Each structure stands twice: as structure tokens, then as C-alpha cells.
Image (cartoon, grey):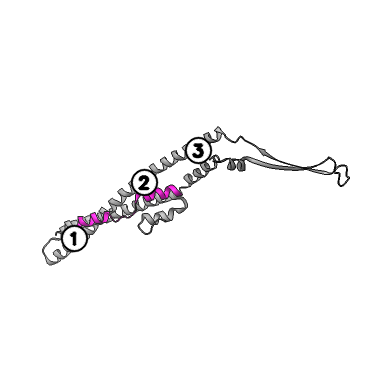
């Protein structure tokens, strides 16, 4: 099999070497994105109690106060202290405003979730493209390096001229520069995508780099 064919076999193999999965990235960012987490808390706070007991606990106030007045027949004092206690329900047991407010917050949360997932999908597409271009460049670089070594030997043995070696060397240098540029681009996109996970960005970055798993 020719060296050229081996080059493309390595290319197809290395493209599949990027081990991260889109679904896991989406789920991880959705779980840890700071804005989405905050909105889930707000929506939860606006959720109406789902039982009479919960509503009484949430919206019922117990009060008590002490004062002077009345007659204490046991002590004979004319102005003993008196105690008053009671239960005060501050809102009705059912409220359409509660349900409406909760529905508004739920819609806002869903809108933010959809917008965030669209951004995540776009960023993952950019990362996949950058990874593919880097993989192709590194494969070409490997091919040119091996061919340069082979050509060097032919020139030394007198089977090829030096000009052909120079031409190949120019391609090799150009591909090295291209691979470095694509590596920087890939790292940048990985970093930007990972930071969507808030405080958990380091774990996601490690996963995108193929150096660890998401918990």
C-alpha cells in the first residue's frame, strides 16, 4: 500500500479520536450554567404550594402579645397581665396571581434554556470544525515529514535533485505553521465552550481535551 493511502487511513482514524459527545456537553452546561441555575431557583421560589398543609405553613402567621388589664381572681390584683394569641392567614388559600407569576417565570426559564442550547450547539459545531481541520493538518504534516525523510535519502543517494527537496521542505514548513494556528484556534474554542459551565469549567475543559470524564 502506498504512503499516500496510509496518510488518508490515518486521517479517518484520527478524526474519530475526539472522544467528547455533544449530548453530554449540553447536559453538563445546562446543569451548571450560572444564569440557568439562578433562573431555576427563581422559578422554584414562585412555585405555589401544592397542598393545603403547605399553604397553611407558607402563608399563615402565628402571633401573640401581652398586655395589662382584666381581673385576676386568684391573686386579687386589679391589673394583672393578660396574654393574647391567634393565627392570622395573610392570603387566600388559592391564588390565580400565584399561578400566573409561576407560569411567567417558567416561560422565561424555558426561553433562556433554548437560547443557551442554541449557543452551545453553535459553539460545538465550531469546535468540531476546528478539530477536523487540525486533524487533517496534523495528518498532512506527518505525511510531509515522512516524505521529506524519504526524499532526503534519495537526494543523498543521488536519485533526486535538491530542488525537489526544497519544494517539499517549503510545504512542510507551511503545514507546520498551519497546524500551530489551528491548534491555537481549537484550544480557544474549547476554552470558550468550557466556560459556559460556570464554576465547573475546568472539568468540562478536561473532558473536551480528552483527558477526563464528566461526573
From the viewer's perspective, is the residue at label 1 or at label 3 nearer?
3
Residue drawn where x is 23% and y is 54% of the image: 12
Q: In terms of image quadrants, where is residue 68? A: top right
Residue drawn where x is 38% and y is 56% of the image: 207
Q: CA distance from mark 1 to mark 2?
A: 36 Å
Does residue 22 appear left or right of residue 13 in this picture? right
From the viewer's perspective, is the residue at label 1 or at label 2 nearer?
2
Horizontal and vertical percent for residue 83? 77, 43
Does residue 101 appear left or right of residue 89 in this picture? left
Q: Earlier in the sequence, mark 3 or mark 2?
A: 3
Does residue 214 appear left or right of residue 12 in this picture? right
Mark 1: secondary structure: helix
Name the quarter where the N terminus is drawn. Answer: bottom left
Disc 1: CA contacts within 10 A as few (<14), some (14-19) or many (>=20): some
According to the image, label 2 marks what residue? 123
Q: Earlier in the sequence, mark 1 or mark 3?
A: 3
Q: CA distance from mark 3 to mark 2?
A: 27 Å
Image mark for residue 139: none
Which SS does the magenta portion mostly show? helix
Horizontal and vertical percent for residue 66? 78, 43
Image mark for residue 105: 3
According to the image, label 1 marks what residue? 147
Horizontal and vertical percent for residue 74? 86, 46
In the picture as drawn, the residue positioned furthest to the front comes out as 74
47 or 198: nearer the viewer: 47
Mark 2: secondary structure: helix
The magenta stretch spans which residues? 6-31
Instruction: Note whether 149 is above or below 125 in the view shown.
Output: below
Amino acid at each position: 500500500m502506498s504512503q499516500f493511502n496510509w496518510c488518508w487511513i490515518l486521517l479517518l482514524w484520527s478524526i474519530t479520536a475526539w472522544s467528547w459527545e455533544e449530548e453530554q456537553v449540553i447536559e453538563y452546561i445546562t446543569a451548571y450554567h450560572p444564569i440557568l441555575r439562578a433562573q431555576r431557583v427563581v422559578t422554584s421560589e414562585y412555585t405555589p404550594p401544592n397542598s393545603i398543609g403547605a399553604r397553611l405553613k407558607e402563608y399563615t402567621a402565628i402571633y401573640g402579645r401581652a398586655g395589662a388589664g382584666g381581673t385576676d381572681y386568684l391573686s386579687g390584683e386589679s391589673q394583672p397581665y393578660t396574654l393574647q394569641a391567634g393565627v392570622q392567614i395573610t392570603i387566600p388559600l388559592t391564588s390565580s396571581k400565584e399561578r400566573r407569576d409561576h407560569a411567567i417565570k417558567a416561560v422565561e426559564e424555558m426561553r433562556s434554556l433554548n437560547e443557551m442550547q442554541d449557543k452551545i450547539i453553535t459553539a460545538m459545531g465550531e469546535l468540531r470544525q476546528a478539530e477536523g481541520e487540525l486533524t487533517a493538518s496534523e495528518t498532512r504534516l506527518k505525511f510531509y515529514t515522512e516524505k521529506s525523510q524519504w526524499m532526503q535519502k534519495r537526494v543523498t543517494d543521488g536519485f533526486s535533485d535538491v530542488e525537489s527537496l526544497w519544494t517539499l521542505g517549503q510545504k512542510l514548513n507551511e503545514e507546520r505553521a498551519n497546524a500551530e494556528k489551528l491548534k491555537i484556534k481549537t484550544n480557544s474554542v474549547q476554552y470558550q465552550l468550557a466556560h459556559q459551565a460556570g464554576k465547573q469549567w475546568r472539568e468540562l475543559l478536561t473532558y473536551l481535551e480528552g483527558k477526563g470524564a464528566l461526573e
